[in-house]
Amino acid sequence: MPEPEVEARVVAPSPPVARQGGEIVPMREALPAAPRDALPFVRMPPPGVRRGPLLWTFALIVVLPTLVAGIYLCFVASNRYVAEFRAAVRSVEPMKSSEIPSLLGLAGMSQTGNDSHAVVQYLESRQALEDIDAAASVRARYEATTVDWLSRLGPNEPVEGFVRYWRRMLDAYYETTTGTIVVRAEAFAPADALAISSAALSLSEKLVNQLSTRARADTLSFADAEVAKAEARLSQVNLRLRDLRDKEQVLDPRKAAETTLGIAAKLREEIASANAQLSAQRSSLSANAPSVIAMRERIAGLERELDRINGEATAAPGSSSDAPGANLSAAKPLSGVISDFDQLENERLFAEKAYQSALASLETARMDANRQQIYLATIVRPELPQEPVFPRPIRNTATVFAIALAIWLIGALAAFAIRDHM
């Protein structure tokens, strides 16, 4: 016997209820209606609206640059080779161990450091570029059609642009810790890099030799000029001394003064002896005796001669030169002549010592010019490179990707932060 059909009914679950004012009401009626924009985070936008800007900005900022960089590095970029040399400016002047700077290892550092910086500045200058271009045809090597278009030097590039390009291809610096000049020259072929680096080394040596030659020439020129000045001064003083001798008619005033003083001393002795004889005669003879008168006249003559001698020696008051009617054109007293001679003699001695010192300095400068030579010592000579330093596709592409990804992440975080605060 067939079973009776049972009607299936779906019983909907009763909504949650709550007790409000003693009555049981549904939960949705118990809660107050919230404003539409009160909880914006509850209403999420559709997925397409949010993911769209992120995807196309990711493709534009990260994927596209990475793809372009990978294609360029793998299929377009030309290989770059680097030839490096290391050199140092040295001087053959021995360091003095007695000086404090030598004990600290600083002796000779200033001059060689200045010359090293001069070499670095020269290699980065337009003059060095023109010199190296004349020796190694740098422009032709960088303008070769085998170089990719992004790295190639333009055929009509002006000299200023060529210098900027050269400074990108040349890395020259001075290591103060080791006192070494390091130069790295880039090119697009191993032989080109070696040729450019060798030309730069040769011109650096030439520059240092020119600096050394000029320093020696300046030192010798200065020493020669000092000797010429000292010699002219000594000659002028000797000429003035000769003119004074001719004017005073005295070769050596000191010897003349000694002779004059000797004569004056003898005259004083004779006067003293005559006075003694006169005293003896007065004791036995009258004052009008002929012998007494003769002795008085002799004493007066001796005294006049003594006054004349004293007048020649000094210009003391009462001397014959100060007597009334004395000859105004009389010779100058020996005391004044000696003073003039002493002044010129001191000048002559000083000029002579200065002349001797200048001669010694000139001789020292000549010895130093042959001994204290500055030269460029090559520590590492440039060699033919075997492996290119650029491009390295994997590493460089990964670097581009990491940088682009970091930029994209920073931009995305900034955009979200701005939107949340609006």
Image (cartoon, rainbow, N blue to C red):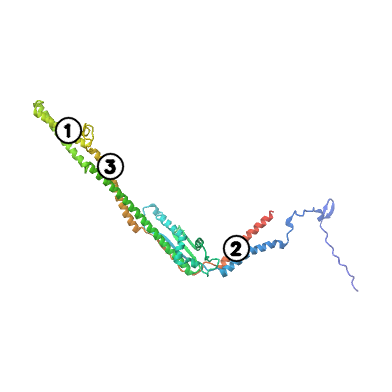
Is 164 left, or right, of 295 in this rendering?
right
Let me know if residue 85 appears in the view: no
* Residue neighbourhood size for the residue with mark 3, other residues' Cα within 10 Å, grouped as few (<14), some (14–19), many (≥20): few
* Residue neighbourhood size for the residue with mark 2, other residues' Cα within 10 Å, grouped as few (<14), some (14–19), many (≥20): some
Amino acid type, callout 1: Arg
**Residue 322 figure quarter:** top left
Circle 3 sits on which residue? 343
Circle 1 sits on which residue? 304
Identify which residue, 34 or 340, lies in the foreground: 340
Q: x%, y% of residue 9?
A: 86, 65
Disc 2/disc 1 C-alpha distance (Å): 120 Å
Disc number for residue 359: none
Q: Is residue 351 above or below residue 187?
A: above
Q: Residue at x 28, y 42 (%)?
A: 343
Q: In this view, does 146 lie above or below 164?
A: below
Q: Is residue 68 above or below residue 99?
A: below
* Residue neighbourhood size for the residue with mark 1, other residues' Cα within 10 Å, grouped as few (<14), some (14–19), many (≥20): some
Q: Which of marks 2 and 3 is in front?
A: 3
Amino acid type, callout 2: Ala
User: Which numbered disc, 3 or 1, marks the residue that appears first in the sequence?
Assistant: 1
For this orientation, the residue located farthest to the right is 1
Disc number for residue 402: 2
Identify which residue, 227 or 91, lies in the foreground: 227
